[in-house]
Amino acid sequence: MSYVPPPASACTEKKKPSSARTPRRRTHTLLADRSLPGAGEPPLLAPRDEWAASASPRPGSTRRAPEGVPPVQAPGGMYASHTRRLLRRDRGARAHGGAARRRASTPLLCFVGAILLVAASRHTLLPKVPFLGSFWRVSLASGAYIPMPKFYGVKYELHTLPVDAKAVADGDTITVYVDAADPRESGNVPREVQQAAAERTKARTAKNYEKADMLHKIIVDAGYRQVPDLTGKHVLAKKYRIRLRGIDAPENSMPYGKEAKEELVRLVKGRTLKVSICDTDRYGRLVGDVVCNGVFVQEHMLKKGLTWHYSAYDRRPELAEWEKQAWVSGLGLWALPNPEKPWEWRKEKRARKW
């Protein structure tokens, strides 16, 4: 039996495997027709607006390639995938006013989330301090930092000489001296006081103590005194009685009255004070805010629980908050089950006299 060769079509045609991958459709057109103008030149890409129209139509699609430009299959899927990305970007740009929508990067979202977490935890875990204006301002809790209040209504300031321990009468009253050479005081010193001070210095040098004591009485009666300054030299000074503004300490005979006086002595002894005077009370004392070595004295006494907030004469919220902190912690007089208010104690004492 002789060999019969198979038909030529059987040799050249191969059955397409069912698992073979279908080439990706072309989504742009190459000007490859040599019969068109520009034949002989390298193939060019069609304009972008014709990319979608020149693509091979999907089933059921009405899109067709421009007349005279036959679609040509691109080698591989590189051009097709790139074109689809460009089309999606253009559609997003047109839909969002010219700016294509982009997803926020993951590191940026994590950074913003960390900032919000720190901001939230700052209100509960850290002290409340002034920071970035009112953004961090929250309701003051016990133990929170409270800035020094503004000294409103101040008429003038006094800068004192070092305070003696004996100058503290109780927990809210101090006797201070201001150098007569101070510009505010120098023009108000009586001439007889200036002469008495000069003669007393000479009498002490000559050890004539009897004359020195007589001259000392003249100086004291006029409201002055010779006291040591920061260098230890005795200078003529004006005497003032200062009532701490906004607080009321227990009287010396009341519970914690002695402790309040001792704490005030410990704070101001041997130090100079800056006193912001705002008023004069009915006893002739100057009412003002006192700062000693950078410490607001009223704040110190309230936080120690040794004084009351005198709300009848001073309604500053900072003072009330400092008193509340000591009350919550049970410090000083707040350790007592029912501490008596000093103004009520004085009122009852006056009533018993009558």
Image: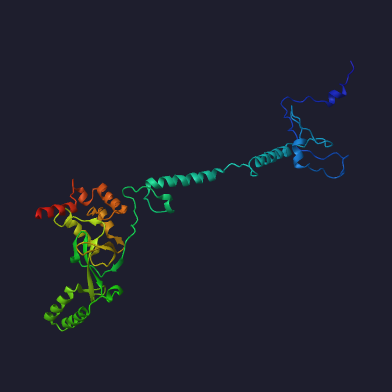
Residue 9 located left or right of residue 335:
right
In terms of depth relative to the viewer, which is nearer, 236 or 218? 218
Residue 345's place in the image compared with 6, above or below, is below
Q: Quadrant of the N terminus?
A: top right
Q: Quadrant of the C terminus?
A: bottom left
The percent position of residue 310, horizontal first and vertical second, equals 24, 54
Residue 106 located left or right of residue 157:
right
Give the total number of marks visible in the rendering.
Answer: 0
In terms of depth relative to the viewer, which is nearer, 59 or 349? 349
In terms of depth relative to the viewer, which is nearer, 139 or 344? 344
Residue 297 located left or right of residue 253:
right
Give the quadrant of residue 80: top right
The percent position of residue 253, horizontal first and vertical second, equals 13, 56
Farthest residue to the right: give it.
2
Which residue is at 40% across, 47% downward?
122
Which residue is at 25% across, 53% downward?
312
Farthest residue to the top: give it.
1
Residue 118 located left or right of residue 5:
left
The percent position of residue 22, horizontal first and vertical second, equals 73, 30
